[in-house]
Image (cartoon, grey):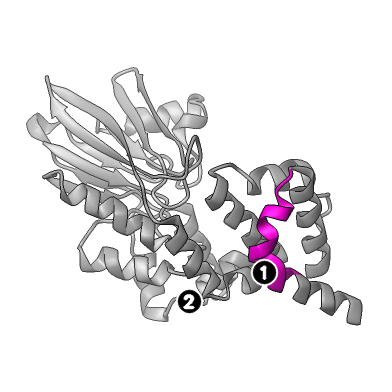
Amino acid sequence: MKIAIFADVHGNLPALHAVLEDIDRQNVDAVVCAGDAVNPLPASVAVWKLLAEKNIPIVRGNHEDYLLAYHHPNGNTILRNSVQFMPVQYAARLFSPAEIAEIAALPLTHAVSAPGGDDVLVCHASPADPARSFSAGIDDEMAAELRRTPAKTIAGGHVHMQWQMRWEDKFLVLTGSAGQPFGENTDAQYLMLSHWGGRWHARHCTVRYSLADTLRMIADSDFLFDGGPIAWLTLDELLTAELRMVPFLRKFCPTPRPSTLPEWAAWVRRYLEAIGRWDALLPYLSEAYFSIESERVSR
């Protein structure tokens, strides 16, 4: 038996097409999306519709939770209004109320029945928490959660890296990211599980996709304008397969956070200049950046 599992598409439609085409050639028994199918890239709705059309089960990830929080009647005002979450605000506005209701109905986990009852449980980060990965460390709370899980094999995404570990009687494995991979290259990543010799084995797969098509998709949208400076960091993550947002927010951006869009733009520019990436990004960002600059100067 073979199960293909992918996660963290984040609205990157060209990458999803490449992953699904590669999976189609491999005669698998089941395909599952381990969350973060959408948000923040501009083809998020198209990704959602394609997965529904192909009847691929999806578990709820933290980025689906962001969209739900934005649309909740008592939603988080910081998420709804702050510059830091402009990419979430952009993506959330793309979805209809009916599609948001479909996202709200997603489960946290999906079980795939397997030979001899050796089922696989698919989650986003961990079985009970779509924002906390077992790969980040197994403390007493995480250990209890994993021991409560009947399945011996647990597959997830969330951290955008391919990884596996056998812990006690569990096989813990991560898919990597289909749409926003981190690591050695920008190729889309997914996981192939095969059952033989009485247990599951993981093959970490990569597939080339047209990053140029994704960049055109971004250029043809309002993502770099309406997503604000944080969207610029997302763009550089796509181009380099290197973390940008987390280091910026944790180590570079001041506390308290900037309060205005021009201030955020200035801090993101300083960060990108400090790591030698501003000049490479400027051809993509010039209109968005200079529109903010002209507004700042006019004030």
Q: Secondary structure at mark 1?
A: helix
At 30% across and 24% down in the image, what residue appears?
A: 170
Q: Quadrant of the N terminus?
A: top left
Give whichever of 57, 190 is nearer the camera: 190
Q: Which residues are magenta?
A: 276-289
Q: Is residue 159 visible?
A: yes
Disc nearest the viewer among 1 and 2: 2
Q: Is residue 11 visible?
A: no
Instruction: State the residue position of label 2.
Output: 94
| In this picture, residue 101 sits left or right of residue 32 | right
At 66% across and 57% down in the image, what residue appears?
A: 281
Crowd class of label 2 (few under 14; some 14 to 19; many from 20; radius 10 Å): some
Instruction: State the residue position of label 1.
Output: 77
Q: Secondary structure at mark 2?
A: loop
Q: Quadrant of the C terminus?
A: bottom right
Q: In the rendering, at what x and y percent does residue 117 appear?
A: 12, 32
Magenta region includes residue 194: no
At 23% across and 58% down in the image, what residue appears?
A: 56
Give whichever of 62, 91 is nearer the camera: 91
Q: Amino acid at mark 1?
A: Thr
| In this picture, residue 78 sits left or right of residue 92 | right
Q: Do the numbered discs 1 and 2 sit on residues whose CB atoms are within 8 Å?
A: no
Mark 1 and mark 2 lie on one chain; the one further toward the N terminus is 1
Q: In the rendering, at what x and y percent does residue 15 appear?
A: 37, 55
At 55% across and 71% down in the image, what residue appears?
A: 219
Q: Amino acid at mark 2?
A: Leu
Crowd class of label 1 (few under 14; some 14 to 19; many from 20; radius 10 Å): few
Q: Quadrant of residue 128?
A: top left
State whether the magenta stretch is mostly helix, strand or loop: helix
